[in-house]
């Protein structure tokens, strides 16, 4: 049902997506769908959670390689991976936009984003040992900025590669500036 919902969301958009159409395309009774999902808002929140879990696995791999003098390269590799996900899976942007639709879905999306930010905060610790008070804000800003830029990168008419390149420069420059504060 979720795979069908993801495809439908990509095909028709959030406003036109209905639970009835999801059930019909999934060839399940509407009652079955409602046993698992109260409405389409719950469905898009679950899709967002699935996307978050996939990114969390990549963050674990990135975190295991830090601290490293090669962290700028690791950051670029991670951002390339995320950009490829957004480029090759149009549902990523559709889900990201859908969870922005109501206060309740935004709150759920914020929890998923917070889970990613907590991992990023842990990854930042060796790079910003004297910035403990700021690290949480830095992590949330990095995650939110990356997702916003990735959504922008796959918008019609955008040069995806150029946007991703600018995102790398922006986030890498920000973190290098923090590292430079540490001194030699």
Image: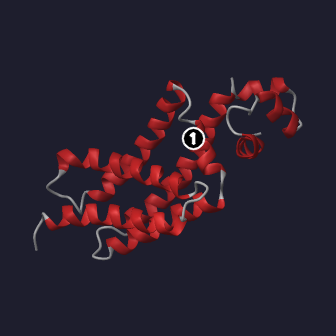
The residue lying at 61 percent from left, 61 percent from top is 87
| Residue 35, x across and y down, in percent | 75, 25
The residue lying at 12 percent from left, 65 percent from top is 182
Indicate the secondary structure of the residue bearing disc 1: helix
* Residue sticking out furthest to the front: 157
- Compared to residue 171, the image places residue 116 above or below, namely above
Count of labels in the image: 1
State which quarter of the image contains the C terminus: bottom left
State which quarter of the image contains the N terminus: top right
Q: What scheme was used to colour the molecule?
A: secondary structure
The residue lying at 58 percent from left, 49 percent from top is 51
- Compared to residue 80, the image places residue 48 above or below, namely above
| Residue 175, x across and y down, in percent | 26, 62
Q: Is residue 25 left or right of residue 118?
A: right
Q: Is residue 95 left or right of residue 115?
A: right
- Compared to residue 19, the image places residue 82 above or below, namely below
Q: Is residue 79 left or right of residue 131?
A: right
| Residue 107, x across and y down, in percent | 47, 30
Q: Residues within 10 Å of mark 1 (few under 14, many from 20)?
A: some
| Residue 76, x across and y down, in percent | 41, 70
The residue lying at 13 percent from left, 63 percent from top is 181
Name the residue beneath numbered marker 1.
97
Which one is in front, 182 or 32? 182
Q: Is residue 2 left or right of residue 179?
A: right
């Amino acid at each position: 049902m979720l795979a069908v919902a993801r495809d439908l969301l990509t095909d028709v958009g959030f406003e036109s997506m209905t639970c009835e159409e999801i059930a019909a395309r999934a060839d399940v009774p509407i009652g079955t769908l409602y046993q698992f999902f109260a409405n389409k808002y719950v469905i898009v929140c679950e899709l967002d959670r699935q996307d978050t879990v996939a990114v969390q696995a990549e963050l674990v791999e990135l975190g295991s390689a830090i601290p490293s003098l090669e962290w700028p390269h690791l950051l670029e590799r991670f951002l390339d991976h995320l950009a490829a996900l957004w480029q090759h899976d149009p549902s990523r942007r559709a889900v990201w936009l859908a969870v922005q639709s109501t206060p309740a879905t935004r709150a759920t999306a914020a929890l998923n984003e917070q889970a990613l930010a907590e991992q990023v905060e842990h990854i930042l610790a060796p790079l910003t040992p004297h910035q403990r008070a700021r690290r949480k804000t830095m992590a949330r800003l990095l995650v939110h900025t990356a997702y916003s830029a990735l959504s922008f990168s796959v918008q019609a008419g955008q040069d995806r590669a150029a946007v991703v390149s600018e995102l790398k420069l922006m986030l890498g420059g920000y973190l290098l500036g923090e590292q430079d504060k540490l001194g030699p």
